[in-house]
């Protein structure tokens, strides 16, 4: 079968169509051309090659005194093509004049030097192609926005036309980086004896944490599958099956509120290993991350990564994912200021709360009056009643609370916080968890204002010994801080019934620059301990059997000690790419309303489809479309 394309300079296989440009019948989808190079590959060593064929999109057009210049782009980059009346035929020039931005074309010609017109800003800038033959495979309509590295179009418009947005080099680079990261992970883990195994996408709903995405069953009406929030139970079943080292680059789904670093569907590097302890997991994952950083960034990471217990992270930084690229650690001040004359401090200490401070070194003069006033607003927005600030002058402390302090308290405060002239101290008094959380968030805000975090430095941290359980005020019961299959510290087991809040788990997070990269734990392999944990969570034996029966039965047939972790692939690539949002490293992302503006999903389905599934929709459908990506 022949293929009809607008062509010029090629052998003619059919009658002329039109007055200026021939629409010719050519053999095959590519006509008489076969791509020899990508557009970003041409260099000075290619000069003189007369049979070069490039194919791609028209990125730019210029007509200079009869010479038509075309920037021809594909994902490797772009090259300049020159159609010169002295070289190109009239037919070729006529077609070149008809081209529009984003037309898809094939060009055959000779690579020549640009001479004095070298463009040092691009890899192909020393050469250009003298166009001798031109085929237009596809004509593009006028564009909704310009295809360029920097674009003015708002994100909702770019998400609606995502396939056009993906032609931009920054997004293509991100997807190439994602591919390279995937390849490093696969190669590294495969070389260390891990098997890449798949787990089901259609499973059973076992609600514990985020909401499930449910899929109705047509065969078993009234029943539902659930899309996996993680492959947790199945990867543990691999360990029970004797497949002792598993990994998967898998898709997961969570129906939860979204933000810049969350999507309803996401990808994770999932790992599980038998006969392993915490340090074994750390060794494997540190090696994996180091291999990725070496391949993608050319950076050798120092190992081992720092370890820090959860309680210490909260005490020093007010968060379980601290950014270690700068100081300003939190300091306990309750014993110093709880007895001062300031009523807010005294009342907090009497109620069992905490007074916590930090020292922003040399920040007193670095921050404007507006920025200083904004600290109080930030503290209130974070949930505190306010924040006390102290400017350290050469001869005194300048602060609204200074009049409530005695000389000994001032001296002790200087020593405890290490205050020097030019420093700025911040103090928050409230219940312990809130005071540290607020001050930890103010620390990050100050870091941004002062430019403290070094963007060229990566500080990895393992946060360990998370609480096993946390109290849910809404449900009035204990719930799993990680998931119910996480192993507690053996020495804390006597506290499980009497003081469950003090039981530590063998759970761990990998943190980078204040962002959680992954989370994992040592798993429970003893059926009796698993039953005890379920009981502490208020899950009856009947409920446990209904939700997890197949897994609990498997535990009873010989389960090895095992551990695992999952790294967020999207978040990992976002950090490597220096992107501001996960949407910049996912090919077809959703908005924060979990909508796809391009395909207009989720969408309504027909009544016939619902009837076939035995489903009725109550209430009116929400037909409003998400107009914003944020």
Image (cartoon, rainbow, N blue to C red):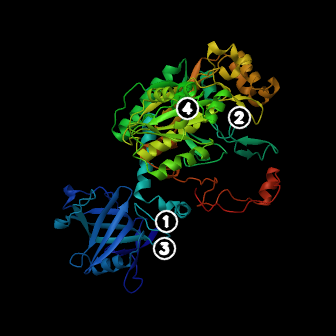
Residue found 23% across the figure and 56% down from its top:
43
As drawn, 195 above or below 558: below
Cα distance, mark 2 to mark 1? 40 Å
User: Which residue corresponds to mark 3?
Assistant: 141
Q: Are marks 2 and 1 in contact (CB under 8 Å)?
A: no
* x and y percentages locating residue 591 in the rendered image: 59, 54
Q: Residue furthest left?
A: 116
Residue found 79% across the figure and 55% down from its top:
610
Q: Which mark is drawn over residue 208?
A: 2
Q: Earlier in the sequence, mark 1 or mark 4?
A: 1
Q: Nearer the viewer, residue 133 or 347?
A: 347
Q: Secondary structure at mark 4?
A: strand
* x and y percentages locating residue 262 in the rendered image: 58, 45
Residue found 44% across the figure and 54% down from its top:
171
Q: Earlier in the sequence, mark 2 or mark 1?
A: 1
Q: Nearer the viewer, residue 472 or 255?
A: 472
* x and y percentages locating residue 140 in the rendered image: 46, 71
For disc 2, the neighbor class at 10 Å (few under 14, some 14 to 19, many from 20) is few
User: Which residue corresponds to mark 4?
Assistant: 356
Q: Nearer the viewer, mark 3 or mark 4?
A: 4
Q: Secondary structure at mark 3?
A: loop
Q: Which mark is drawn over residue 153?
A: 1
């Amino acid at each position: 079968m022949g293929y009809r394309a607008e062509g010029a300079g090629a052998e003619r296989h059919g009658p002329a169509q039109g007055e200026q440009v021939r629409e010719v019948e050519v053999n095959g989808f590519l006509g008489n051309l076969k791509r020899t190079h990508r557009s970003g590959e041409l260099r000075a060593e290619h000069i003189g090659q007369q049979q070069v064929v490039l194919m791609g999109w028209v990125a730019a057009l210029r007509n200079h005194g009869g010479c038509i210049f075309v920037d021809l782009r594909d994902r490797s980059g772009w090259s300049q093509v020159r159609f010169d009346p002295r070289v190109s035929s009239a037919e070729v020039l006529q077609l070149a004049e008809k081209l529009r931005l984003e037309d898809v074309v094939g060009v055959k010609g000779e690579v020549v030097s640009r001479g004095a017109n070298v463009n040092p800003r691009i890899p192909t800038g020393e050469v250009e192609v003298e166009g001798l033959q031109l085929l237009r495979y596809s004509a593009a309509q006028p564009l909704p926005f310009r295809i360029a590295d920097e674009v003015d179009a708002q994100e909702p418009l770019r998400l609606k036309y995502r396939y056009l947005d993906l032609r931009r080099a920054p997004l293509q680079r991100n997807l190439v980086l994602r591919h390279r990261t995937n390849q490093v992970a696969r190669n590294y883990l495969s070389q260390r004896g891990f098997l890449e195994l798949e787990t089901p996408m259609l499973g059973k709903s076992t609600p514990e944490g985020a909401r499930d995405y449910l899929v109705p069953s047509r065969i078993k009406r009234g029943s539902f599958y659930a899309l996996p929030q993680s492959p947790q139970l199945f990867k543990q079943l691999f360990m029970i099956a004797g497949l002792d080292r598993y990994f998967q680059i898998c898709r997961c789904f969570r129906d939860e509120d979204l933000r810049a670093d969350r999507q309803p569907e996401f990808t994770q590097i999932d790992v599980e290993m038998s006969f392993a302890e915490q340090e074994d997991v750390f060794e494997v994952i540190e090696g994996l991350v180091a291999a990725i950083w070496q391949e993608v960034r050319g950076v050798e990471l120092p190992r081992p990564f720092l370890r820090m217990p959860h309680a210490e992270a909260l005490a020093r930084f007010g968060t379980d994912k601290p950014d270690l690229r700068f100081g300003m650690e939190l300091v306990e001040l309750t014993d110093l200021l709880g007895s001062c004359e300031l009523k807010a401090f005294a009342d907090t200490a009497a109620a069992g709360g905490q007074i916590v401070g930090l020292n922003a070194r040399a920040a007193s003069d670095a921050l404007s009056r507006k920025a200083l006033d904004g600290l109080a607003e930030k503290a209130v927005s974070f949930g505190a009643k306010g924040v006390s600030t102290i400017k350290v002058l050469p001869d005194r402390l300048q602060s609204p609370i200074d009049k409530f302090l005695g000389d000994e308290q001032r001296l002790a405060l200087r020593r405890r916080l290490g205050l020097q002239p030019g420093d700025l101290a911040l103090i928050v008094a409230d219940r312990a968890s809130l005071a540290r959380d607020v001050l930890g968030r103010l620390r990050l805000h100050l870091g941004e204002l002062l430019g403290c975090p070094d963007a060229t430095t990566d500080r990895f941290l393992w946060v360990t010994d998370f609480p096993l359980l946390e109290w849910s005020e809404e449900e009035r019961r204990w719930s799993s801080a990680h998931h119910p299959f996480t192993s507690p510290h053996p020495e804390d087991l006597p506290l499980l019934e009497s003081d469950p809040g003090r039981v530590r788990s063998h759970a761990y997070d990998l943190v980078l620059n204040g962002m959680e990269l992954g989370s994992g734990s040592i798993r429970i392999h003893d059926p009796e301990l698993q039953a005890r944990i379920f009981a502490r969570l208020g899950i009856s034996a009947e409920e446990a059997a209904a939700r997890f029966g197949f897994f609990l039965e498997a535990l009873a047939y010989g389960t090895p000690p095992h551990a695992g972790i999952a790294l967020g692939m999207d978040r990992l690539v976002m950090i490597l790419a220096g992107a501001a949002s996960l949407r910049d490293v996912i090919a077809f992302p959703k908005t924060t309303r979990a909508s796809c503006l391009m395909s207009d999903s989720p969408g309504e389905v027909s009544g016939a489809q619902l009837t076939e599934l035995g489903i009725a929709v109550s209430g009116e459908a929400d037909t409003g479309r998400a107009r914003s990506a944020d």
